[in-house]
Image: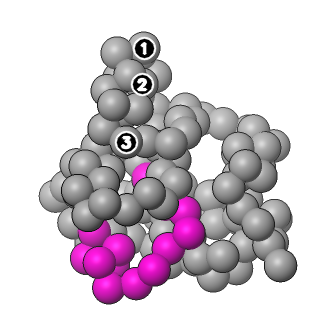
Amino acid sequence: MKVLVVDDSGVMRKIIIRSLNAVGVIDIVEAGDGQEAFSLFKSESFDLVLTDWNMPVRNGLELVTDIRSTGSKVPIMMVTTEAQKTQVITAIQAGVTDYLTKPFENDTLRKKLDKYVSVS
């Protein structure tokens, strides 16, 4: 399983990566914004994308739209502080598969990851 983690905060990427490692995922690629992430997405194959919403250059919602425009059905989890109902609906309409608001407990992230992560 290969996962793309997208967040402009290096600390948040480390937290998410630690949780991924805890459920057995070690093939992880990091990106600091949506533009960098989409370039990686076009050149590599991923089984799951975890992205923040608010980032410079290209935000997470734009990234989701870009990924879905390729026809990809890869699961995308939005991990963000944006928790208003209208924002969640907007993200789902754009193609987000799952949603997790920050701050979160590692157990909560692990439970969500269990839906998508299959470690052999």
Q: Residues within 10 Å of mark 1 (few under 14, many from 20)?
A: few
Q: Are marks 2 and 1 in contact (CB under 8 Å)?
A: yes
> Residue drawn 37% across and 62% down?
72
Q: Residues within 10 Å of mark 3 (few under 14, many from 20)?
A: many
Q: Amino acid at mark 2?
A: Val
In the rendered image, the vertical position of residue 56 relative to residue 48, given as above or below: above
* Residue 36, horizontal then vertical, whole percent: 27, 72
Magenta region: 38-51
> Residue drawn 52% across and 54% down?
75
Q: Spatial distance from mark 2 to mark 3, Cα to Cα?
A: 11 Å
Q: Is residue 110 visible?
A: yes
Identify the residue position indicated by label 1 in the image: 85
Identify the residue position indicated by label 2 in the image: 88
Q: Amino acid at mark 1?
A: Lys
Is residue 2 part of the magenta span, yes or no?
Answer: no
Using residue 44 as the reference point, say whether residue 27 is left or right of it: right
Q: Amino acid at mark 3?
A: Gly
Q: Is residue 102 visible?
A: no
Disc 3 secondary structure class: loop
